[in-house]
Amino acid sequence: MKKTDTNLKQIAYETIKQKIIQCEYRPGDILSEMMLMEEIDASRTPIREALNMLAQEQLIQIIPKKGIIVLPLTMKEIAMTFEARMLMEPYIIETYSKYIDMEKLHELETKTETILNQEIHEQKDSIVFCTIDDKLHRTIANACRNKYLNMNLSQIYDQNMRIRILGEQNIWERHKVAAREHLELIRYIESGDIPSAVAAIRVHLIHSKEAAFSSFLM
């Protein structure tokens, strides 16, 4: 397929975004258009359009004549992220649980059980945990039939992935505790015990927030 500026913009957007979310481009890093043009093999126009999209999602800040800064993760940012999640995620389970993809939920349950039976002690293991965590919360969020909540949650989960990878990569015990909390949550949903699932996700989010704060203060 011939590469056009439109699909090059999308390729650039997705490539840069994933590198930011996975912390290959770390908070505070300075990027340049020239560097990105070489990495993605694209001209200046699609790169600039992709950067404008990422700036709107508050992942970067474009400073004229200076460069592109990957926005930092502050304590305030973490607090706002968890405040929004605490308001929305329990509500989605309570209101839209019948739309949750149970097949995907069971698949994530199996993956979580498998990784819990393994030794974890390297950064790549933390990324596996973070990826499963992200997929679980997005699976639940995808049950929501309110497009405005979905749009907000998608941006929140992008930030949350950065928070987990950057802040918790060496807190192995928290990864295991979070995975056990995930299993409890999944099993409540599968059994149709929605009040217990709502309570479980609230506890999980409280613990996750505490771990995020602790890790960024270390």
Image (cartoon, rainbow, N blue to C red):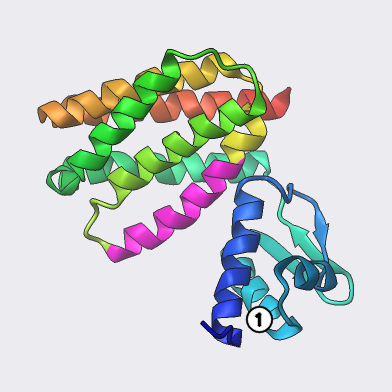
Q: Is residue 117 above or below residue 20?
A: above
Q: Is residue 180 above or below residue 34?
A: above
- Residue 159 part of the magenta-drawn span: yes
**Label 1, residues with CA under 10 Å away: few <14, some 14-19, many ≥20:** many
The x, y position of residue 133, in whole percent, is: 43, 35
Report the residue at 44% width, 27% height from top. 206
| 54 on left or right of 138 | right
Report the residue at 61% width, 36% height from top. 165
Q: Which amino acid does label 1 sit on?
A: Pro
Report the residue at 67% width, 72% height from top. 51
Q: Is residue 70 above or below residue 109?
A: below
Q: Which residue lies furthest to the front in this view?
A: 1
- Residue 190 part of the magenta-drawn span: no
The x, y position of residue 209, in whole percent, is: 51, 30
Q: Can residue 119 be seen in this view?
A: yes
Q: What span is in magenta?
A: 147-162
Residue at numbered disc 1: 46
The x, y position of residue 6, in whole percent, is: 55, 84
